[in-house]
Image: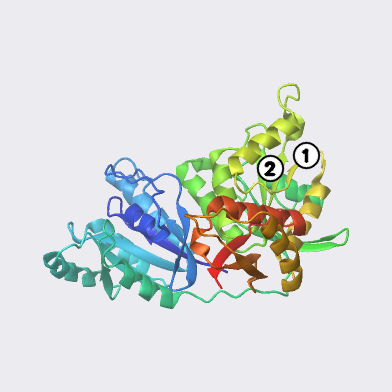
Amino acid sequence: MSNIVAIVGRPNVGKSTLFNRLIKRREAIVDSVSGVTRDRHYGKSDWNGKEFSVIDTGGYAVGSDDIFEEEIRKQVQLAIEESDIIIFVVDVEEGITPMDSEVAKILRKIKKPIFIAVNKVDNSMREADAVEFYNLGLGEYFTLSSINGSGTGELLDALAEKLEDQIEDEAELPRFAVVGRPNAGKSSFINALIGEERNIVTDIAGTTRDTIDTKYNRFGFEFNLVDTAGIRKKSKVKEDLEFYSVMRAVRAIEHCDVAVLVIDATRGFEGQDENIFWLAEKNKKGIVILVNKWDLVEKETNTMRDFEAQVRREIAPFTDVPIIFISALTKQRIFKAIETAVEVFENRKKRISTSKLNDTMLDIIKQNPPPANKGKYIKIKFCTQLPTPTPQFVFFANLPQYVKDPYKRFVENKLREIFDFKGVPIVIYFRKK
């Protein structure tokens, strides 16, 4: 199980910039207008060999100060409930503001590790100014400048010490997380499988409150179904709720073996679907895509083949994913969906013996060697599957640095073709022998 680290703080203290530093890419929109962080609140990060997920509790706050306060309070509450570790970002230029004190007051009551990150410290004078943050009563603080990255290493070192070691539990039942945008039909799908109204299904987006685990044991299959859906209080179907549903999907995906992504055929494969797909891929989970409500689509204008081709274009280059057209309402092909999820689960823990791997792959590589680079020929001598919980392979070569992405993809596609890794992300390394 991966650890979740939440970044909290009032708008404009540099949460998004720190978030981008941690996940090593510019994904959150960074803008000096307060409260522009909208989507893209999560990413993977690793430090000292430990992986964790980072959640930026972004600024949804728009409007007057009291709305602000309320929003911040909600975000902090959410971070407390959902994460394992909290980074509280404050701004050295502005010192302790009343809102910072409010946040600190909530944080002082909880037992989780909390790190204060004093941002915008880029000279020794500001270093001295940072001392006042001891007054927040949360202990030690870390000074950093998230714009140029100075100081983030110390924060990460301290953070990594608090991360739990990830334990893969082998003996447990497979866990399938049913994920997707609000109202795509996740609960209806689970009800259709279980045959009882375990989850209340209505047409209001987001009536599922929490991740619910259901043990499934029929037709010779046994596994846990994790139902996630947005926490959507009906009165407030607003943006922060979209964020709740993202948080829940993140948590469910982290803790599952196979993510069953339900998409709404009448709406197509949208941005949010794509985010969830890549989140599962980044976490190296098995993936099955279910196109729900296919019975409602105009068949003249849209064939299954067209729809499937469009989805595969969106998810390239990882296109080796089963796509199944279902109707949770009429129970069409829902059993096929589960069968497929079980197959993907088996593929994910597949082990290929080193001798078999070498016999097959070295032959193919010999016939299609990597292109020579600057007159240097790349020779691949040996390959093996790593003892990791998900399929990862290492190929030993004389000049691994010259092996380019297209060739890596060629090798990956061959592995998929021959050994059937349908629905499973695989990782390939080229190393010096």
Disc 2 target residue: 185
Work out whether 330 lies above or below 19.
above
The residue identified by callout 1 is: 329
Name the element at disc 1. Answer: loop
Crowd band around label 1 with a 10 angstrom C-alpha radius: few (<14), some (14–19), many (20+):
some
- Residue 204 visible in the current orientation: no
- Residue at 66% from the left image edge and 74% from the top image edge: 169
Front residue of this view, candidates 251 and 96? 251
Q: For the residue marked with disc 2, what is the amino acid?
A: Gly
Report if the CB atoms under discs 2 and 1 are less than 8 Å apart: yes
Q: Indicate left or right for 209 with 71 as reference.
A: right
The C terminus lies in which quarter of the figure? bottom right
Describe residue 396's horizontal placement relative to residue 125 as left or right: right
- Residue 187 on image: x %, y %: 69, 48
Identify which residue, 153 or 276, lies in the foreground: 153
Whether 297 is drawn above or below 7: the answer is: above
Residue 380 vs residue 265, the one in the foreground: 380
Q: Residue at x 40, y 59 (%)?
A: 76
